[in-house]
Amino acid sequence: MTDYEFHLPVGEYYLQITSKHERLHQSLVRWYQFTRPPSDLKLGTIQIVITEEDFSLHPLEPSTEWDGKNCQYYGKDCRGIVDDNDPVILWINPNVGFQYIELFFRVVTAIRIFSLGGLMIHAAGIVRDQLGYIFTGYSGVGKTTVCRLSEGCTVLNDDMVILNPTESGWKISATPFTNPTQVLPGAGNAPLHQILFLKQDQNHHLEDVPNSKAVAELLTHVPVISHSPQLTSSLVSRCMDIILKTPVKELHFLPDKGFWDLL
């Protein structure tokens, strides 16, 4: 059978997605048609294999389990493993929902980016005047709302972004991970200028955040890696470095664009 290959831009890298199934390949191309041409820096390879394996005993909700350095992924009608090998493998049933395939892409991205010194964060990333801002908080706090209120800015992603270290601090990069309810992701990267922890309120104002609290909260917004006991020490150190090198505030806001006047 023919090997089909798709390059998915992720931050400053790309994931090479391979399979032997034309319809799956065409679905990938359509789903990610909004993305820019990928860079020439390869993050890793994911091989998707269709199987008749029975996944009915898997957890009802998508989950990951760490076994030392290896991470097992379980989704509805699929499972995958991320280890030191390349390619990593995702086994799927023919009727798997595409969202469960993309969740595995996120798992692979989080692990591979961390191994390169970076971090994937559950946050909205916006570039304004060539400076990068992270808006983070728990689901439903308003990350997508902030993006929709940021006319004239570049929305890198309203849910998941990548941070990488630089000589002078950190930079923020786009990811392609999305769903129809979200703001369509943009492309590119920018120096990380500020981190905002979102709080819905009756007016717009900023509050200081102690470093210890900022690190603790940032840790809660790191998917996949934060569940690995072996990576805990490195993760805490990395989050501390980000907080020490980046201005951090708690942004209390209303659902209107007036919050930008404070930044």
Image (cartoon, rainbow, N blue to C red):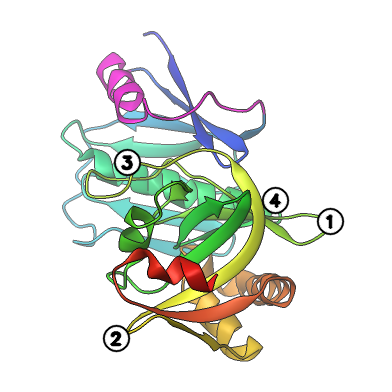
Looking at the picture, tell me which residue is in the foreground, 252 or 235. Answer: 252
Q: Relative to 81, say whether 202 is above or below.
A: below
Label 4 vs 3, first from the N-terminus: 3
Helix, strand or loop at mark 2: loop
Q: Quadrant of residue 119?
A: bottom right
User: Could you give the CA–CA distance between mark 4 and mark 1, rounded to whole angstroms?
Assistant: 15 Å
The three-letter amino acid code for the residue at tag 2 is Gln
Secondary structure at numbered mark 4 = loop
Q: Nearer the viewer, mark 2 or mark 3?
A: 2
Q: Tell me if I can see residue 87 in this picture.
A: no
Q: Would you name the residue on which mark 2 appears?
A: 202
In the image shown, does 73 or 247 lie closer to the viewer? 247
Q: Is residue 34 magenta?
A: yes
**Picture disc at residue 116:** 4
Kindly identify the residue that appears in the image at 42 percent across and 64 percent down.
65
In this rendering, the label closer to the viewer, 2 or 1 = 2
Image point 30% across, 61% down: which residue?
145
The region drawn magenta spans: 21-40
Mark 3–mark 1 Cα distance, whole angstroms, equals 35 Å
Label 4 sits on what residue type?
A: Leu
Q: Position of residue 223 (x, y in %)?
A: 46, 64
Q: Which mark is residue 213?
A: none
Work out how far the residue at label 2 is from the one at label 4, CA to CA, in angstroms.
41 Å
What is the x, y in percent for residue 5? 46, 18
Which residue is depicted at the point 40% across and 80% down? Answer: 204
**Marks 2/1: CA distance?**
39 Å
Q: Position of residue 212 (x, y in %)?
A: 62, 90
| Residue receiving disc 1 | 167
Residue 101: numbered disc: 3
